[in-house]
């Protein structure tokens, strides 16, 4: 039987990312994403509903998130669902999370000019060490085509420009 596991989320980051490195040197960060939905209920009134989703980012994408993403940042994540299970005090627990395979930073840089989202001054144009194909001075960063987890190999569609 065929299966398909793809998630696309657009929301606001709920906390500043905390970048860490695992024993083999791969960067990883966990972020929370608040995704809002607005709909009419049975009585015709508009109801706001917020869903909070945990997202794990790996590799260079985790590093970019650690540098440029802050609480409240609008963000688009494309990835896959993963079920984590563990046992604590004899009780079985599980939690569904998203493993981010692509990240798109949305909005503009703070201050409209040389200030980054955390208030650090940046020169106009491409930052040092940032490949030209990932940086667009007018639109920010489009981070994609990375290995989502150390054991996961990148697919053939990594050169698709979205």
Image (spheres, rainbow, N blue to C red):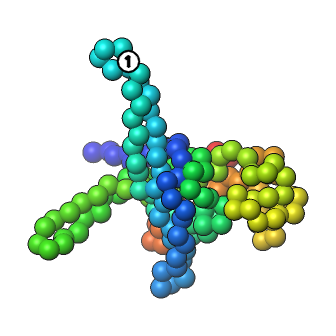
Label 1 element class: loop
- The foreground one among 101 and 159 is 101
**x and y, in percent, of residue 16 in the image:** 55, 62
Residue corresponding to mark 1: 45
Residue drawn at x 48%, y 80% as measured from the top left: 22
- Left or right, 74 with reference to 39: right
Q: Quadrant of the C terminus?
A: top right
Which residue is pictured at 56% across the width and 56% down the height?
A: 71
Q: Quadrant of residue 48?
A: top left
Image coordinates of residue 99 in percent, x first then y, are: 44, 58
Above-or-below relation of 18 to 117 = below
The residue at 54%/82% (across/down) is: 25
In front of the other: 87 or 34: 34
The extreme right residue here reads 124
Q: Residue furthest bottom?
A: 23
Residue located farthest toward the left when viewing the structure as drawn: 90
The answer to whether one can see residue 102 in this image is no
Residue 74 % position (x, y): 59, 46
How many numbered tags mark residues here? 1
Q: Quadrant of the N terminus?
A: top left
- Is 8 on the left-hand or right-hand side of 64? left
Residue 8 spot, x, y in % from top left: 49, 43
């Amino acid at each position: 039987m065929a299966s398909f596991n793809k998630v696309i989320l657009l929301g606001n980051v709920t906390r500043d990312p905390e970048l860490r490195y695992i024993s083999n040197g791969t960067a990883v960060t966990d972020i929370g994403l608040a995704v809002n939905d607005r709909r009419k209920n049975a009585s015709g009134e508009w109801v706001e509903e917020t869903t909070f989703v945990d997202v794990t980012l790996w590799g260079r994408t985790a590093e970019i998130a650690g540098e440029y993403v802050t609480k409240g940042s609008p963000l688009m994540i494309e990835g896959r669902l993963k079920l984590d299970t563990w046992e604590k005090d004899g009780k079985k627990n599980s939690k569904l999370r998203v493993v981010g395979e692509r990240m798109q930073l949305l909005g503009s840089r703070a201050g409209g000019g040389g200030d980054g989202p955390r208030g650090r001054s940046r020169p106009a144009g491409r930052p040092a060490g940032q490949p030209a194909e990932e940086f667009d001075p007018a639109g920010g960063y489009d981070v994609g085509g990375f290995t989502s987890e150390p054991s996961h190999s990148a697919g053939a569609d990594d050169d698709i420009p979205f």
